[in-house]
Image: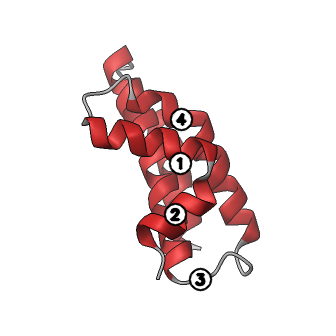
Amino acid sequence: KKWENALYALDCIESDLIIKTKLICNAMNYAKWFDGCYILSQIARNNAFSKSKDLTNKCKSYVRKYFKYVFKTETSLKQKIKALMFYFTPIICSKIFYGR
């Protein structure tokens, strides 16, 4: 449940922003991508894909929807390559990078 709250919190923070510059919006969307990847990695680490299908699907959609913001923020080449890999195969990448 707390992982769902993390994604919900980012949506709430974004909707409550008073100053919405392009830089801030890119950073918020990057945070959504990062949280989606992180939550998938935790699901992989605990081998809980079958137990949390809804959350897995939501995280996959976040990873695919917000991956382009990795390229709009100041991130390393390693992070950009990781974003492309997660875009095409989020489940496999979460198992490779973080699974047991």
Q: Nearer the viewer, mark 4 or mark 3?
A: 3
The three-letter amino acid code for the residue at tag 4 is Tyr
Say few, some or many: other residues with alpha carbon within 10 Å of mark 2 (under 14 / 14 to 19 / 20 or more): many
Q: Are marks 2 and 1 in contact (CB under 8 Å)?
A: yes
Query: Total marks drawn?
Result: 4
Residue lying at 37% horizontally and 36% vertically, measured from the top left: 80
Element carrying mark 2: helix
Above or below: residue 97 compared with residue 82: below
Left or right of 7, for residue 82: left
Q: What's the distance in space between the residues labelled 4 and 2, CA to CA?
A: 16 Å
What colour scheme governs how the chains and residues are painted in the rendered image of this protein?
secondary structure
What residue is disc 1 on?
Answer: 86
Q: Is residue 21 above or below residue 68?
A: above
- Tag 1's secondary structure? helix
Answer with mark 3 or mark 2, whichever residue precedes in sequence.
Answer: 3
- Asked whether the residues under the numbered discs 3 and 1 touch, taking CB atoms below 8 Å apart as contact, a structural biologist would say no
What amino acid is found at the position of numbered circle 3 in the picture? Answer: Asn
| Camera-nearest label, 4 or 1 | 1
Q: Is residue 59 left or right of residue 41?
A: right
Looking at the image, is mark 4 or mark 2 nearer the viewer? Answer: 2
Q: Which mark is residue 57?
A: none
In terms of sequence position, does the residue under pointer 3 or pointer 1 come before the other?
A: 3
Query: Where is residue 55 drawn, in percent x and y?
Result: 67, 64
Identify the disc placed on residue 66: 4
Query: In 3D space, how far apart are the residues under numbered discs 3 and 1 (Cα atoms)?
Result: 18 Å
For the residue marked with disc 2, what is the amino acid? Ser
- Which one is earlier in the sequence, the residue at label 4 or at label 2? 4
Q: Earlier in the sequence, mark 2 or mark 1?
A: 1
In the structure shown, which secondary structural element does the residue marked by tag 4 occupy?
helix
Q: CA distance from mark 4 to mark 3?
A: 24 Å
Residue indicated by mark 2:
94
